[in-house]
Image (cartoon, grey):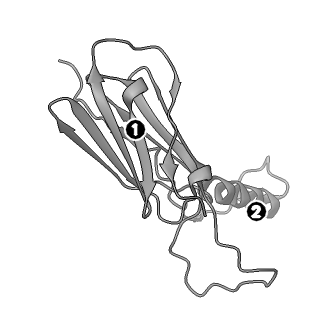
Amino acid sequence: MAPAFTPCAAPPQHEAMPKPRKPIAQDPGVTNPGGLLMEAEALLERLTLGTWVPNLDLCETGGLYTVRVELPGVDLGDVSLSIQDGILRVTGTKREPAIGHRMLCYYCLERRYGRFQREVRFESVVDARRTTARLEDGVLTVALPKLIERRGQVVQIPIVGKKR
């Protein structure tokens, strides 16, 4: 039996790892357990910071797929869109707004910033040459007409919208 079709593939979310209950010092081969733990925590922080997964909707009508991706605060120049082997790939960066040279002290930081990537796999072949994309009011809308088999080519898709 074939696996279920799952068109939207989001990168795995990295959750903060809980601190180990038993100290690393119990391992006789570790000479600096505090330093090793600090290095591991710093690595985990680098991996989880900058990971942002925007929400995505996928709709299908008779001859067209429509993909809508929420990209609030993302500039047009910070988004890239491509199609290869039946996979639409949306990549980019959501940048933290510049506040000047002042040091900020956050009391609450719930919005995410950094690089992102979303992929959508299509069952039907899409016409990359007639695909259109528009970034407006923080929503990227991509219209992908269906086509007879033509997989294997990489096609860059220009995004239309207002630059800030």
Which residue corresponds to the image point at 47% horizontal and 36% vertical from the top-left? 89
Q: Is residue 141 above or below residue 100?
A: above
Percent of width and height locating residue 91: 54, 44
Q: Is residue 135 above or below residue 117?
A: below
Q: Is residue 61 left or right of residue 48?
A: left
Under mark 1, the amino acid is Thr
Label 1 crowd bin: few (<14), some (14–19), many (20+), radius 10 Å: some
Task: Write down the quadrant of residue 18 in the picture.
Answer: bottom right
Q: CA distance from mark 2 to mark 1?
A: 47 Å
Q: Is residue 20 left or right of residue 110?
A: right
Asked if disc 2 and disc 1 are in contact, CB closer than 8 Å, the reply is no
Q: Is residue 97 above or below residue 147?
A: below
Q: Earlier in the sequence, mark 2 or mark 1?
A: 2
In which quadrant will I find the N terminus?
top left
Q: Secondary structure at mark 1?
A: strand
Which residue corresponds to the image point at 40% horizontal and 14% vertical from the top-left? 151
- State the residue in front, 54 or 137: 137
Q: Secondary structure at mark 2?
A: helix
- State the residue in front, 19 or 78: 78
The mark lying in front, picked from 2 and 1, is 1
Point out the residue furthest to the right here.
31
Q: How many numbered callouts?
A: 2
Q: Is residue 32 left or right of residue 83?
A: right
* Residue picked out by circle 2: 38
Task: Write down the quadrant of residue 70 in the picture.
Answer: bottom left
Percent of width and height locating residue 138: 44, 62
* Residue picked out by circle 1: 132
Q: Is residue 106 left or right of residue 32?
A: left
Which residue corresponds to the image point at 42% horizontal and 33% vertical from the top-left? 88
